[in-house]
Image (cartoon, helix red, strand yellow):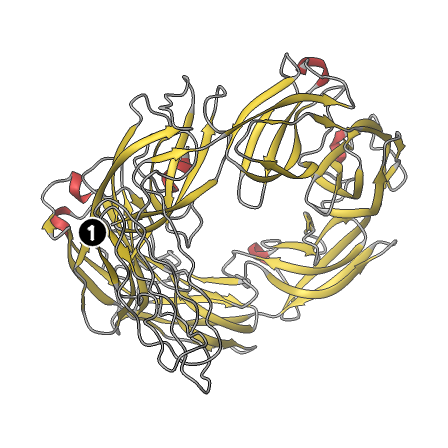
Amino acid sequence: MSRFLFFAAVAIVVSTVGCSSKPHDSADAGGTTGTAGATGSPGGTGGAAIGGTGGDGIGGTTGSAGNGTATGNAGIGGTTSSAGAGGTTGSAGAGGTTGTAGVTGGGGVGTQCLGKDVDVRATTVTGAVTINGVAATDPTTKGEGSIFLRNATDTALLGSTANASGTYSALVIPGTYDLYFGFSAAGTAVPNNARAKLRSGVVVGASPLHLDVDIPTTKVSGTVTVNGGAITNTNGGEGTVSLVNAAGDSAILANTAPTGSYSTLVVPGTYDLYYTNTVSGSLLPTNTAAKIQSGIVVGTSPLSLNIDVPVQTVSAAITINGAAVTGAAKGQWFLALKNAAGDRAELLTYASSTGAYSARVVPGTYDLYWTCNGSDLPGNTAAKIKSGIVVGTSALSLSVDVPSATISGAVTVNGAVSSALFTGITYLNLRNAAGDTVPLPIATAGTYSARAIPGTYDLYYGNANAGLNSTVPRNAAARIQSAIVVGTSPLVLNIDIPATTVSGTATINGTPITTTAQSAFVLTLQSAAGDKVQLATRPQGGAFSTPVVPGTYDLYYTRQGDIGLEVPNNVLTKIRSGIVVGASPFALDVDIRATTVSGAITTNGVVNPGVPGDLAFIALSDGVSNIADSGAQLTPAVSASGTYQTRVLAGRYELYYFTFRATGTTIPRNLNAHLGCFIVP
């Protein structure tokens, strides 16, 4: 259910897709400006507003030039021009500037958005489900899987292979999809594929679609060995071997259990073979995704595939600045081999006598990475300490010296020591371009000391969990210094954290906030680099005051608590851009513009209450971020009354439908269907 908290909603109680019978007014958009020529030519035709009920036409961009007479006609409505009051038909957009002479300009394209009444159009898709031509309706013995339609942005579940009738029926929002199968429970008939594409370009239109689905399967069987020998007990560790194709589908063939043999069903195709460690042990490699064979073709005939997982022992002894590690610091680090394909093998076994970590690893070429949290050793969390390590057919012993330098200094806030920077807390981190970080925890009041592997870093400050009355900035990840070079000698780096107080009062539609319900929101500043500062959380009376690291931010609004009509139901919706916080105290009063939106919601023109257990939603997205990141809060998409009412921020949104749970066939099964644009005046 956590996903719901991210979505935007029209308080729309719905169940399927489509355009409203009363679209919002919108003007034709103009083409680009024509290139100058010898003779003036007419500008683009003025955009006519699309009719609505008392709505305002929305101006298009400036009209482009065309060929012809010496004087250009008026272009399409300018960006800031709005149409006159709408009647049965919207009035024309205000004229733009005179068309520029030149090559023929492109014509404007009209855009219609959904109106306040939303009808979700959906089509019934039905058919039989078979596996190699035979129904598999007994999930207890034959297993179970799902069939679903999927395109670049949406997925619609059609049904299961285990339906007693051997058939399925589902409502789907029209569109073009590919057809997939996904394994869910093991059995004697169902293939192990996680996401096997069965068919491409399935078009769901306005008319009912009959789509029979047959899932082809082939038996793949053989033995599994490690370095030519069987794993005789699980104390040596456990792992799996899987087929993976270029499209991301995978099918687990077997684990390395003592039986040593396997037999499973797979959808035909071309795959690579991968090994993954699941339980650490002394005999099996620790790799997380090691490719051990390529180009395996599973056809329509049974395939015999004997699998041997090659392994070699790799050990790495560590010295720091040329000296052995002694005392409590011994072994207080982690080493991992990583390759360019994303495979990772941790060296887990530590020998205190040699100071070396070791593990069994699948042969290949790797880089060696260091991770440590100890104060007496470099605190880097993901530092590459050796490149191009070739693990071949023989055991490999490495000796790696890790350079280390001390970095220390004073920490102040606006030039003064701050008691709000607590001892032992990490507010400061060094970070390099590769993503490696070095925490710089506060050691005593106003100082820090740490060790780092030499390199070039940026310095970040973060204090996202501080209380609202904190005297230090609440930024989550503010870069306060760049290109810090840590060399081989100790570095003294005094750090001053700049802080500016941002304060103001929030209002709703110009009206003061006087109740707890009206203050149920959060205001957040966010930078282009991803830093965030929570300015206000449920501000009583609307007032807030927060220290912030200077920078340029956008302002976002997020509703807190249940959906209602006291405040807009938006989540992470941008309400202001380009706020520059400098060195001086900054006054930022925020008026939250809220509009109550209401209307009818139907499915294929009919009120749809759904059935018990149905859970689907209509959501507004800002059209820039992913729908799960911003927009207006959710509302159920099934309703006995066929109506909705909610309060949202004014603006242009994209309208989405998605299902969380469908227990019957009365609501569409889509998970993220785009319905169209939606304008909140």
Q: Depth check: 81 or 666 in front?
A: 81
Q: Depth check: 489 or 609 in front?
A: 609
| Res 535 seen here | no
Going 21% across and 47% down the picture, which residue do you hit?
54
Compared with residue 416, is residue 190 higher up or lower down, i.e. above or below?
A: above
Q: Quadrant of the N terminus?
A: top left
Position of residue 201 in the picture relative to residue 633 (left or right) = right
Compared with residue 382, is residue 583 higher up or lower down, i.e. above or below?
A: below
Q: Which residue is mark 1?
A: 593
Q: Secondary structure at mark 1?
A: loop
| Res 657 seen here | yes
Amino acid type for the residue under numbered disc 1:
Arg
Compared with residue 623, is residue 547 higher up or lower down, i.e. above or below?
A: below
* Quadrant hosting residue 338: bottom right
Going 61% across and 55% down the picture, which residue do you hit?
330
Counting from the top left corner in percent of width and height, residue 201 is at 65, 41
Q: Depth check: 607 or 631 in front?
A: 607
Residue lying farthest to the bottom in this orientation: 38
CA neighbours of label 1 inside 10 A, class few (<14), some (14 to 19), many (20+): some
Counting from the top left corner in percent of width and height, residue 662 is at 48, 24
* Quadrant hosting residue 258: top right
